[in-house]
Amino acid sequence: MTTLKTAVIPSTLALLLLVFGVILALQGANEDSARLLIRITAATSLLLFSMAFSTSSLNQLLAESRWHPLLLARRRAGIAFAISHSFHLLAIVALVQLAYDGDFSQLGDVAGGAVVYAFIYLMALTGSYIANALGKGGLFYWAYSALCISLLLLRITAFCRARAQT
């Protein structure tokens, strides 16, 4: 039996691959298609983030059993959000290549965007590893959790030092 919990990641991936394929097949790889893909992936990312972020609050405030499947799927919705936002990043990179000849300075603060993506990926990684470490207590999961947190701290330290030097 397929549940929301088991379906959210493969469904997100399949939907995004289908959308990318259809748009590229119909419009080709051009600036307009890249901008359309950016808008679509922004919407899917917002939907998935909202689902992951608000589910426990909805469950707590409304105390209705209909929110329970969302609560069970919350962690995977967070990972699906990271997948969706990865597609968003691919569309942004495509836009820069197609419209700005690879000049990423046209985007403004690229470092800020990089930090946001680092947080997204680290949340996805630590969310799955830390949950397993707490649930199973295996050394493997604790080691990966510690590594992910260390990488996050390293990234924050480097970002702050670079900001301080400018």
Image: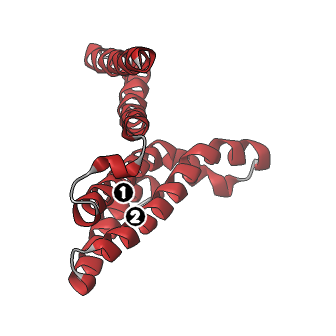
In the rendered image, residue 152, in percent from the top left (x then y), is placed at 38, 22
Q: In the image, 69: left or right of 93?
A: right
- To which residue does mark 1 refer? 88
Query: Which kind of residue does numbered mark 2 sit on?
Result: Ile
Residue reaching furthest to the front: 166
Task: Find out whether the residues at labels 2 and 1 contact each other: C-beta distance under 8 Å.
Answer: yes
Q: Based on the displayed image, in which of its 4 quarters is residue 111 positioned?
A: top left
Which mark is first along the chain, 1 or 2?
2
The residues tagged by marks 2 and 1 sit, at their Cα atoms, a distance apart of 6 Å
SS for dot 1: helix
Number of labelled discs?
A: 2
User: In the displayed structure, would residue 119 be above or below residue 53?
Assistant: above
SS for dot 2: helix
Q: In the image, 140: left or right of 65?
A: left
Q: In the image, 42: left or right of 16?
A: right
Coloration of the structure image: secondary structure
Query: Which kind of residue does numbered mark 1 sit on?
Result: His
Q: Name which residue lies at 73% across and 41% down.
A: 60
Q: Based on the displayed image, in which of its 4 quarters is residue 57 positioned?
A: top right
Dividing the image into 4 quarters, which one contains the C terminus?
top left
In the rendered image, residue 50, in percent from the top left (x then y), is placed at 58, 52
- Camera-nearest residue between 33 and 62: 33
- Camera-nearest residue between 35 and 45: 35
Q: Name which residue lies at 46% across and 42% down.
A: 75
- Camera-nearest residue between 22 and 129: 22
In the rendered image, residue 127, in percent from the top left (x then y), is placed at 43, 32
User: In the displayed structure, would residue 97 be above or below residue 143?
Assistant: below
Determine crowd level at label 2: few under 14, some 14-19, many 20+ residues with C-alpha closer than 10 A: many
- To which residue does mark 2 refer? 38
